[in-house]
Image (cartoon, rainbow, N blue to C red):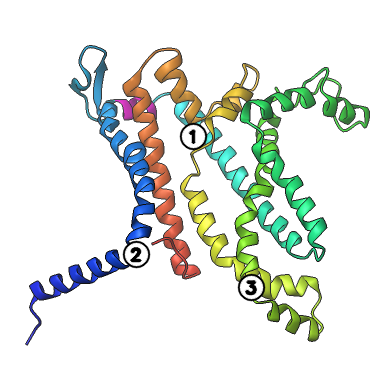
Amino acid sequence: MSADPVHGILRRELRLWRVFRRDYQLWIFLLPALAAIIVFNYLPMYGIQLAFREYSFKAGITGGDWVGLKYFEKYVNSPMFGLTIKNTFTIASMSILLGFPAPILLALLFNQIRSPRYKNVLQTTVYMPHFISTVVMVSLLHVFLSMNSGLLTSVLKSLGLLTEKANPIGDPGSFVWVYVLSGIWQNCGWDSIIYLAALSAVDSNLYEACRIDGANRLQIIRHIDIPAITPTIVILLVLNCGNILNVGFEKVYLMQNSVNLSTSQVISTYVFNVGLKNSNQFSFGSAIGLFNTLINFVFLVLVNLISRRVADISIW
């Protein structure tokens, strides 16, 4: 005879209540984070309908006429669609291909340093650029890479690595490289912390056993360190691929100028220009932003599915 479903539900509810009573302090600590997520992530979703309405200042967000997919079709059929998608995807994919492995390699190198003193000094040194603000970071790029007075530009030109008319900060062909490489320099050390935390959980007896068996450092990295951080690598890769079209607005906008606009106009800056700065097309800007979010969600689901089938590691 099958069990009563009502009794099953009651048992699950009683079990949840016991868990809550046992760990109620932890749930209380979790409340501020839940409140922040609700206020800043879920309540603003009420404004998504703006992408499907004809916005007017008098009618407000919910008072405009319903236009359906009008603004989505307008963006897809506009000349800026291909350009913004291409530039955004190029910058994001280059950031993942070059920037994602960098903190992993740095963490593996730090883990091989035996002297705690030197290790702490080096870690502090590579962490510091992360705390430089975006405005200051872009200002430094202009100081070092400007065409005529840039310190690094002058050195590269004197060595013959750049032509006399080269302009790294304004050349459309070098914009992506400057953006990606400066981002790696700024965030590589900070991003390596999570991998160092995963490596710190490795049993030291494994290292001793490998050294007794005659393994060198590369073999230790290959057979102990990399397997230890593989789950962390996969999870972070899935999350990064879920944000593949979310290129940072601030840095791109500050580095953007009339010369490099052909490679620096991304979705976020285009939304700002059409939605706020120039034409105040709030509905059009909301539709582009929602389209960007949907594409990111599709990438996240696909990469998570591939990860679950290939490596048996996934977010859900």
Give the mark nearest the N terminus, 1 or 2: 2
- Say which quarter of the image contains residue 253: top right
Q: Nearer the viewer, mark 1 or mark 2?
A: 2
Secondary structure at badge 1 equals helix
| Residue 261 in the image, given as x and y percentages of width and height | 59, 22
- Say which quarter of the image contains residue 143: top right
Tell me, yes or no, whether the two marked residues, 1 and 2, touch with CB atoms within 8 Å: no
Give the mark nearest the N terminus, 3 or 1: 1
CA distance separating discs 1 and 2: 47 Å
Residue 295: give its label.
Answer: none
Q: Is residue 277 left or right of residue 7?
A: right
* Image: magenta residue range: 71-76
Residue flagged by tag 3: what amino acid is it? Val
Residue 202: give its label.
Answer: 3
Residue 73 forms part of the magenta stretch = yes
Quadrant holding the C terminus = bottom left
CA distance separating discs 3 and 2: 29 Å
In the displayed structure, 172 sits above or below 218; it is above
Q: Nearer the viewer, residue 147 or 184?
A: 184
Characterize the local packing of mark 2: few (<14), some (14-19) or many (20 or more) Cα atoms within 10 angstroms: few
Q: Would residue 172 be visible to someone looking at this image? A: no
Please give the residue where the numbered disc 1 appears in the rendered image: 85
Give the mark nearest the N terminus, 3 or 2: 2
Please give the residue where the numbered disc 2 appears in the rendered image: 23
Q: Is residue 61 left or right of residue 99?
A: left
